[in-house]
Amino acid sequence: MQISPLAPASFPDLPDINGVTFATAAAGVKYKGRTDVMLALLAPGTAVAGVFTRSATRSAPVLDCQAKLGGDASGGAAILVNSGNSNAFTGLAGDGSVAALTAAVAEASSVDAARVFTASTGVIGEPLPHDRITAHMADLVANQQADGIDAARAIMTTDTFAKGACAEITVHGQTVKIAGIAKGSGMIAPDMATMLVYIFTDAKIGQSALQAMVAGANDRTFNCITVDSDTSTSDSLMVAATGASGADVTGNSEFADALHSVMLDLAHQVVRDGEGATKFVTVAVSGAADDADARKVALSIANSPLVKTAIAGEDANWGRIVMAVGKSGAVADRDRLSIRFGDITVARMGWRAPDYSEEATSAYMKNDALEIGVDLGIGSGASTVWTCDLTHGYISINADYRS
Amino acid sequence: MQISPLAPASFPDLPDINGVTFATAAAGVKYKGRTDVMLALLAPGTAVAGVFTRSATRSAPVLDCQAKLGGDASGGAAILVNSGNSNAFTGLAGDGSVAALTAAVAEASSVDAARVFTASTGVIGEPLPHDRITAHMADLVANQQADGIDAARAIMTTDTFAKGACAEITVHGQTVKIAGIAKGSGMIAPDMATMLVYIFTDAKIGQSALQAMVAGANDRTFNCITVDSDTSTSDSLMVAATGASGADVTGNSEFADALHSVMLDLAHQVVRDGEGATKFVTVAVSGAADDADARKVALSIANSPLVKTAIAGEDANWGRIVMAVGKSGAVADRDRLSIRFGDITVARMGWRAPDYSEEATSAYMKNDALEIGVDLGIGSGASTVWTCDLTHGYISINADYRS
């Protein structure tokens, strides 16, 4: 598979996080010749927060993780992820697989099964051959030698590049590190952006304070991206804070900002790896009746197949933006509506801008990164979402993914 | 452009409707070498009903038609349609174009401008060169010689075949005829299925009774189809009843059924001409908490890019159906969910069906017409919608439509 033309130049140099170790294995769940299992072990006292898909058909591992959040952190924790099979819509067998996996981690390590969080990503509806994973468990626990990039690679499915992001700040004179990995390129939409994301930090913070911080940042990052409007049954974002730095970040806005920036970076990388994507598109809506209306308009534009195919064709077809505004359900008034592509105003007050230049706009559309701005001229509601174009590549990848 | 593989074998032999005549012209609004204007003249006393897009950015002609419905029918009426330019998001100039067109019809005929209904379909946001149309007006009024198929052809945009449907019933011993034409193949979604539809009958019925009948049938036909989830700014469905047969059909269920069948036939033809479509897909949802929930699930499946690309690839990827159910927002319980492709049950009670055969299901997916059945196992709500697959053809058509 070719690497997305929108991929970052390189994987970042993720810092080691004190209290976190990784291992990976090639268990052959579905893929051959690559790693497909990642096990992270977290030191005793690590606070684990998480947000998950709201799908009514969410997977067995998601249900299990949700039940376990907020448990006793004293004995450490583990995160076990496999790619190739999502263990979703697998009925009682799916619950059984989760139980087998968490028990195997507990048996091979000192972590209680109630503190083992799992995730599975890949095909829906096929029983997970969990024996292939448990066969590697002793090795996974014994050899916690993997780097962040190894961990990021093991959880990939249709991703064309491994995704990582990091930050380092100083809190009360102490260095606090944040390192995160993510996977995801299709079935990406709020809520929440369909993917697996694991972020680790040596900051010290209680579970409930961390949970609130993560949920807030999630709303402005992963819940604001869409590739194809399809929401996965397995979306999971987990943030683990080991506390090893000794720096208490409870209520610390600098830490919250750093966490937000790592999440935004990873969210953008998922869009940049959108299946078949050739353009990274920012949709910024302002002047809406309220923020919720702005978000409706932004997502209506970002999810419109006609808008996305026009962008793929580098066609400044702003009429389709008008269409997407109109169908969004948000309060809109044709005669107050303005639309810009980058800095070029194409429509103003319900009409093509008098100085509109097809040539200048077409030239702008050739950029890899585009911004579509819409001002509804009604109120002060605003929202920004990120998406990609819809290309032949998306069709090729998805018309024959399973076979 | 190649004709859709899902097209009907031939255009039906539409009956002449007493009180309705057509003319077409090649005005060169945008297209060269084909007709692009259709004028229908309706006899005095014709009742005209209509339903239109609910887009907040609806076009000038739509706003004008909506204001005119229910006016005095005694002096006859006219319907003027052009293809190539939608006269949408054209500000005050758009209103001016509508006024110029309706005035030109009135001047050339005996129809009052207040009874001239117009529609425009094509590119959004470019001023309509209405002079090109009014230049042909005297001819259009003088030479009302066109057949239904001519009228159907003149209103096409990206359509690959002309769409017509008809019915004939006997009411109180008198023959009542219905003939309809439609255009539409992209930007198709409720509300309402994006298209132009004109249906004519010699039945006798008052405007408000007709309006209620049309609105009811619309809910079960054009509002139940989707090609790409994008809603046009110009959707218009109009039904004109001349009364020439003398048969009063007010409250007549047989006529209502015949009208419904003509509308359903045309709605299916629009899906069969969905941009790039190679599969006609019926999505039938049952067992929902209520009909609204069933509809949510059906549309979530029918609009999912991942479901539609899997169908394009003849891939029995029912896991994506599970995903679409989960994201729909409807009440669903994984362990009560059943899914079938045609008569083949693929999932039952939240799990792959024990007798599931990949081979049999894959063979079924090769059919041109497919049915996806979902039973939520919760209540008695049901809904059926129709859609097509998402293919390379859709991308090719839409990534370079305007230029």
Image (spheres, coloured by chain):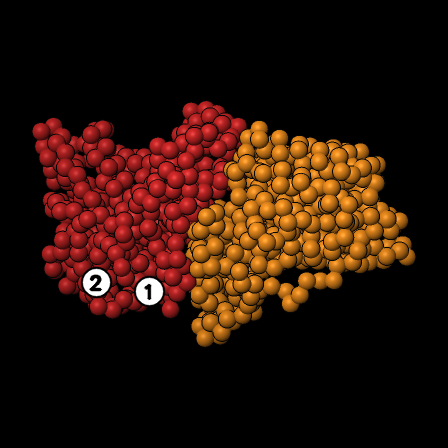
Chain colours: A red, B orange
Number of residues whose C-alpha sits closer than 10 Å to that of mark 2, classed few (under 14), some (14–19) or many (20 or more): many
Chain where mark 2 sits? A
Q: Residue furthest right?
A: B173
Q: Earlier in the sequence, mark 1 or mark 2?
A: 2
Chain where mark 1 sits? A
- Disc number for residue A128: 1
Q: Is residue A187 left or right of residue B110?
A: left
Residue B233 visible: yes
What is the secondary structure assignment of the residue under circle 2? loop
Q: Amino acid at mark 2?
A: Thr
Q: Is residue B174 left or right of residue A262?
A: right
Q: Residue at x 37, y 38 (%)?
A: A360
Q: Percent position (x, y) of residue B385? A: 58, 55
* The image quarter in which residue B45 lies: top right
Q: Amino acid at mark 1?
A: Leu
Number of residues whose C-alpha sits closer than 10 Å to that of mark 1, classed few (under 14), some (14–19) or many (20 or more): many
Q: Percent position (x, y) of residue A348? A: 46, 29
Q: Percent position (x, y) of residue A91? A: 41, 61
Q: Percent position (x, y) of residue A64? A: 33, 52
Who is closer to the viewer here, B201 or A344?
A344
Q: Is residue B188 above or below residue A135?
A: above
Who is closer to the viewer here, A238 or B93?
B93
Residue A66 visible: no
Q: Residue at x 32, y 39 (%)?
A: A221
User: CB of mark 1 within 8 Å of CB of mark 2?
Assistant: no
Q: Is residue A150 left or right of residue B172?
A: left
User: Which residue position is annotated with label 2?
Assistant: A35
- Disc number for residue A232: none
